[in-house]
Amino acid sequence: MSDRSSGYWNVILSLLMWGILPIYWKAMAEFPATDILAHRTIWSFAFLSVLLFYYKIWNDFFKNFSSLREIGLLFFRAFFLGINWFIYVWGINHGYVVDCSFGYFIMPLVIVVMSFIFLKETLNKLEIVSFFLILLGVLNLTLRYGKFPWLALSLAVTFAIYALLRKTSRHGPISGLAAEVAILSIPASIYLVLSGTGNGWLYYRDISFATLLIILGAGVVTVVPLLCYVHGIKRIKLSSAGILQYISPTCTFILGIFLYKERFSSVYFATFVMIWISIIIFSYDSLKRAKLIQ
């Protein structure tokens, strides 16, 4: 399999896993989002450490700290990744699954615009039309519903920035991600120590064995799709990955409407119509440029 094909399949697999991940975080809904984020971070680093030993790439890991510039970029990547994780878990467990899907529907176009600004990738007329349709959808939701979609836009922007920083990083998927999560593990560990001190060290003494396994597994379900995504995005154009990004929010949207029975008003419907029209235009343009359609 060529590097390009491997890149596409890894991105697709990661998006499918992300699409059904709300089910996992809903299983941890009894815990605060800060607790979930802390455990997610620490157990992710534990899992990544095993991979660093297995592949013998600790030297690559330490290269992330080789200069002040590298450390600065590392902190930026870790910051936006951590913020994205927190917003997503908080949104899922507070009944905003549809809003989260909204964020990841608009994220590809945010990535395209950032690629245009920072990577000098060109935007054609159809991509510009798609972007303005998304903008109309956001304005419709804000003006008619009286609610600015801060959660959706925050998810879209934070992950788009992370994807951009990851795209331009020269570090490998495992070593780079391990370094980012190592940085996040510092405040996560401090938080859990302070939380444990305040609530007693047997804070989780009454949880079931199944719940304990879910907590410990938070690292695996976090790292595996992210590694697939990082592995894939390094091998294909950032803007070319845009059409694939809709796999994840589509799965999440279906879960929000049909499994979790979230409200879907006419205002939301009008907004999503604009988004879906934008997706059709954007997808048609991407397929045409890839010469998959005439």
Image: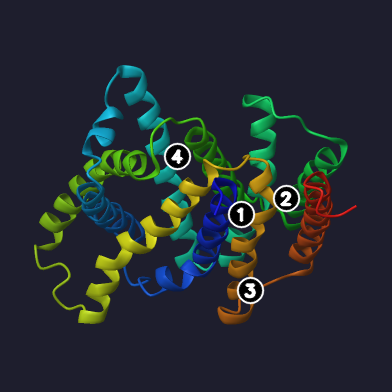
Q: Which mark is residue 80?
A: 4
Of badges 2 and 3, nearer the viewer stands 3
Question: Crowding at label 3, few (<14), some or many (≥20) Cα neighbours within 10 Å?
Answer: some
Q: Which mark is residue 254?
A: 3
Question: Crowding at label 1, few (<14), some or many (≥20) Cα neighbours within 10 Å?
Answer: many
What residue is drawn where x is 36% and y is 59%? Answer: 33
Q: Amino acid at mark 3?
A: Ile
Question: Crowding at label 2, few (<14), some or many (≥20) Cα neighbours within 10 Å?
Answer: some
Q: CA distance from mark 3 to mark 4?
A: 27 Å
Q: Position of residue 116 (x, y in %)?
A: 70, 29
Question: Sequence-wise, which precedes: disc 3 or disc 4?
Answer: 4
Residue for badge 2: 142
Residue for badge 1: 104
Question: Crowding at label 4, few (<14), some or many (≥20) Cα neighbours within 10 Å?
Answer: many
Check the image and name the residue furthest to the right: 294
Q: Amino acid at mark 2?
A: Thr
Q: Amino acid at mark 4?
A: Phe
When asked about the image quadrant of residue 46, the answer is: bottom left
Q: CA distance from mark 3 to mark 1?
A: 13 Å
Vertical relation: 230 (above or below) 115: below
- Check disc 3 and report its element: helix, strand or loop: helix
